[in-house]
Image: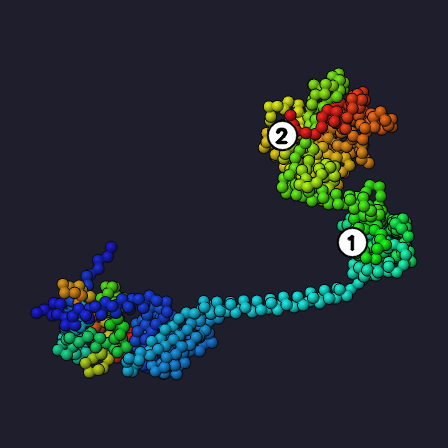
Amino acid sequence: MSPFAAQEVNEGPMVQELRRVLGRLETALSAISDALVITDDQGLVIWCNQSFDRFINQPRMLSLGRPILPLLPRDHQGEPLLAAHVIATASRLPGSTTVLLQRQPLQACEIEWRPVDSEEPAPVIFCIRDISSRISNQELRATAERIEQQRQNSDRLNRELQQQQLALANLVRECSVTGLPNRRGLRERLDLALEQLSQRDGLLGVLFCDLDHFKDVNDMHGHQVGDALLIEISKRLQESLPADATVSRLGGDEFVVLTGRIRDGSEALAIARKLQQRIGEPWLMHGHHFTPSMSVGIAVTDDPAAEAEELLRRADVAMYHAKRSRNESIALHDTSIEARFSASRRVHQELRRAILNQNLSLAYQPIVSIQDHAARCNSHESDSASGDGRILGHEALVRLRPEQGLPIDSEQLILEAERTGMVLELGSWVINEGLRQLQPHPQRPDHWSLAINISPLQLEQSGFAGGLLQKIEAMAIDPRRLVLELTETRILKDTKTGIEALASLRDHGVRVHLDDFGTGYASYSWLARLPIDGIKIDREFTAALGRDSRRERMTSSMIRLGLDLGLEVVAEGIETEQQRLALQAMGCCLGQGHLFGRPGELP
Amino acid sequence: MTDQAPPPSLEALQNGDRPFVLADQNGVVVAINRAFHQTYGWTEDVLKGQPLSVILPESFRMSHQLGFSRFQATEISTMLAHPLRLKTICQDGSEIVSDHFIVAEKQQGGWMFGATLTPLPPGTPADA
């Protein structure tokens, strides 16, 4: 028999099966990430997997039969990874250790060894596991916990500091700028003054004084000058006070004077006037001349049980009334002021709610031709002017449907909207709604136009003109049919921006009318400066026709001037035929008023 | 394109003048040649039927067995057709560092493995 012929295997199929099993296990052990190595009891390598090859960076053939210790890399300090005694005892004692291979980047491993107890002498199985990521996570967690602890400590210290600051602030009764009593000092003095009311006759007056335009001083000249002005004001107030009166600084540009005992409100008014006179004297600072002024609201009481806060509130309400008044800069709180304040607050609330809920509407009042056919007119409808009362357009007037109570006066609505800045949202709604009506409509004649009121605040908004023109184009509206009415009395603050916006709109065909003409302080000045197409003569002049010859001459003069400048002239508030005829005689071409129709739905 | 000579057959190796040992699919020695006997002292009567690992150092045996088994399971080997410098155990227990060149051949009865050994001068370091 040839020696190369397959021999009959005595071990039989069992050996072959075991070989296959061992082969699979060896393949599997080679694939795992943990480095495995088996040594004999002397520490000589008798088997290892591929991860161990990679760990020591050496092929298996060079490891077999060699002592394990010199094969292993050194730790981060250059020391052997395992102590010699570990190798010496490993065949008897299992164990484990964690070692740091290097710090940057962090590399660490855990080495675990276990003798194969079933054999004598026992080989040792070493398992080497990379735990770098676990160590990193632990370090990160430890760092995070340390930072969190530091944060908590810092928060605690901040809270303690705030409490201490609060406690200190509560002890402070003086304004650090002026040396006057501050809000807390005032409150104590006011409580004391009320208490003393029960012990003597007379009234207590609270004068709430607010400097006018103080913000402008700060903005234009800086806070140093602003503070100097506050100190000067405090000196002047103190110098001008009656002997038993005191002054405190409430904060910002607000001062409060407690009058001491007075006979009545008129005495408080007299004190206020005296203070105003002294405050209004010129003041020179860093080469700049200032003429300070202030508005004063007064509340008086003879009731010792009056609430200090309520008294201050009334004086504050009166001060706001004075500040908003065109004629008076001092106001004594009374029921009418309180009623107006309440009404103003109601308008404010209703307006906010209406804008939020879109609970608004537009009413349209017709603008008609009042001139004879042959008369000279600058009407937009150049070839069809006639005195037949034909409707040439409408003015859109915003209306608010209050959720509670009586309807809100339009004038009051606009004033409140402008005062609070809500006019921007309101104006945007009005424009969108108005433009919707200007879209091509079969029942609107070609010459029909719609006038929409805009606020100077809208005009001064960046991009107002561009945005409006975009809408006009997108909605396929003829821009010549849109008239923007700008109220003369609400003077543009940022004149340059506003004028540029108006000019841009006019360049695209939009017409601009100056509303309420004649009621402002600088009507003729605006005529020269603003790029406009027409004026609307205020209703007060129309109402004066036939009753006030001086105003009548002014009306005639305004109409002539408008026509001479090539402007459209619209008279507002025409309620009678006599007024229409008078205006017609003066050459006015267009009119608006109850005579021709009240605000309502569009036809 | 290069012409590469086919590996010598087990029979040719058996009849060659270099030490040669033949094992079956289970790693059991089935034959040695005269040169093997003359170099390492083993007689065929003694070695025949023994695991091939008896001529390997103790520290190599486990790895050898597992590697042999892995070949059985996968028919993939990293040892075949590569020169390996190993200590070879003689019949008298002495060790001779030799280059082992192992080849495998699939025959009707299964895999057969043959190793040609080249003894190296004393003092030559082994791979294992």
Regarding residue B8, the answer to whether it shows in the image is no
Label 1 vs 2, first from the N-terminus: 1
Give the quarter of the image for residue A536. top right
Residue at the outermost left position: A1
Q: How many marks?
A: 2
Q: Is residue A463 above or below residue A542?
A: below
Horizontal side of A247 relative to A444 (left or right) equals: right
Can you identify the residue that label 2 sits on? Answer: A437
Q: Quadrant of the N terminus of chain B?
A: bottom left
User: Measured from the top left, where is residue A349 in percent x and y?
Assistant: 69, 44
Horizontal arrangement in the rendering, residue A533 relative to residue A28 (left or right): right
Quadrant of the frame with the C terminus of chain B: bottom left
Tell me: residue B18, above or below residue A488.
below
> In the visual, does A132 lie left or right of B69?
right
Query: In this view of the protein, which residue sits in the foreground, B59 or A535?
Result: A535
- Residue type, label 2: Gln
Left or right placement of residue A52 versus residue A578 in this view: left
Is residue A218 visible in this depiction of the protein?
Answer: yes
Q: Secondary structure at mark 1?
A: helix
Please state the chain letter of the residue tagged with numbered disc 1 in the rendered image.
A
Residue at (21, 73) in percent of width and height: B117
Q: Quadrant of residue A204?
A: bottom right
The percent coordinates of residue B87 (x first, y second) are 25, 77
Mark 1 and mark 2 residues within 8 Å of each other at the beta carbon: no
What residue is disc 1 on? A310
Amino acid carrying label 1: it is Glu
Residue at mark 2: chain = A
Q: Residue at x 78, y 55 (%)?
A: A309
Q: Label 1 crowding class (10 Å Cα cut-off): few <14, some 14-19, many 20+?
A: few
- At 50% from the left and 69% from the top, the residue drawn is A139
> CA separation, marks 1 and 2?
49 Å
The percent position of residue A482, horizontal first and vertical second, equals 66, 29
